[in-house]
Amino acid sequence: MRIGDALHQARQQLEAAGVPDALREAELLLAACLRRERAWVLAHREKPLSGRNQRRLMHWLARRVRREPLAYITHRRWFYGIEFYVARGVLIPRPETELLVEVFLCWARGYANGGVLVDAGTGSGCVAAACLLNAPCWQGIGIDRSRRALRIAMRNRARLGLSDRWLLLQGDWLTALCPLSTDAVLANPPYILPQEWAHLEPEITHYEPKRALLLPRADPLRPYRQLIRQASVVLKPGGLLALETSPTLVEAVHTMLVQHGYREIQVQADLAGHPRVVSALRQAIG
Ligand SMILES: C[S@@+](CC[C@H](N)C(=O)[O-])C[C@H]1O[C@@H](n2cnc3c(N)ncnc32)[C@H](O)[C@@H]1O
């Protein structure tokens, strides 16, 4: 079988399974399977596939047809121009979260000597790693309550050569930090409302960790309230708090920040134009 035939077959099967953008998915699947870039696959349609690669492709294709996300199959995902290891049990990094990194890097320009940033709910560690790789004077602390997520973050920390600048802790948001003080707190907490869950793609609802995505039914704003309250204890005066959220919750998060005395509250929109990140500075004392 040649690469071109494999692509055609994969596309047909993915389309039949209702996978959106089946052609692109087939190309990416084949590229990952051959450990090549997508452009290489497109330029080598006439090349034969070895029996081993054919078997791997069939296995991966069967998983993708069952709507398992590509990133869990290939164990790789790009975020902020960096390749991360991902696996079941951790949220797959999303492009809109890159805005959180942008907000931090823009603010951190004023801190020539660096400082300490906290990535609360670190998951794969994509936010902390992208910040630390682009702000070499900074140290980081990643916190997650999920042991599985932390194991994956540890793997990324080692792969990216950040072991001496990035501490990983298991804990409930920022409680593990008190009484330590930090310069910046970044978080992408769960923000899917229970009523939104049924409308999401099967890639999300069947495979990604529900506890990383879904807000509690009884008190949906709880993660934001906890983070805002706890950050006002651990942040140094003038420190940055930046929270990713959904357009539905932006106003409520903004109001909570006002109630807790934060200043310079700003809402940034993602590339699709949706309000996505709310940032604020902790009130200076006096
Ligand atoms: C939406 S995911 C974000 C993961 C990663 N920061 C990213 O942007 O890809 C939320 C993360 O918060 C963690 N989490 C949820 N509740 C938590 C809590 N109470 N304390 C610490 N981590 C929590 C989840 O395990 C999950 O890894």
Image (cartoon, helix red, strand yellow):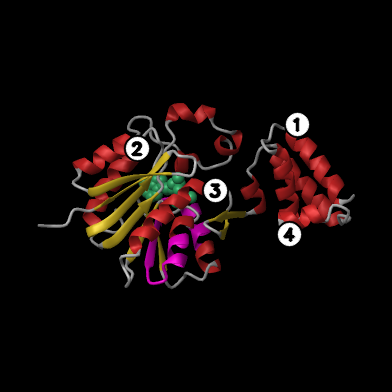
Q: Is mark 2 within 8 Å of ligand 1?
A: no
Badge 4: few (under 14), some or many (20 or more) residues near its Cα, within 10 Å? few
Residue span colored magenta: 129-154
Label drawn at residue 16: 1
Label drawn at residue 250: 2
Residue 88 horizontal side relative to residue 223, left or right: right
Q: Is mark 3 within 8 Å of ligand 1?
A: yes
Q: CA distance from mark 3 to mark 1?
A: 24 Å
Q: First in sequence: mark 1 or mark 2?
A: 1
Label 3: element kind: loop
> Comparing marks 4 and 3, which lies closer to the viewer?
4
> Comparing marks 2 and 3, which lies closer to the viewer?
2
Label 1: element kind: helix
Q: Amino acid at mark 2?
A: Val
> Is 104 placed above or below 203 here?
below
Label drawn at residue 227: none
Q: Which residue is mark 3?
A: 92
Q: Which residue is mark 4?
A: 36
Instruction: Check contact, mark 4 vs mark 2: CB within 8 A.
Output: no
Q: CA distance from mark 1 to mark 4?
A: 26 Å
Q: Amino acid at mark 4?
A: Arg
Q: Is mark 1 within 8 Å of ligand 1?
A: no
> Comparing marks 1 and 2, which lies closer to the viewer?
2
Q: Amino acid at mark 3?
A: Ile
> Is 76 placed above or below 248 here?
below
Instruction: Check contact, mark 3 vs mark 1: CB within 8 A.
Output: no
Residue at figure coordinates x 25%, y 40% from the top left: 256
Q: CA distance from mark 2 to mark 3?
A: 22 Å
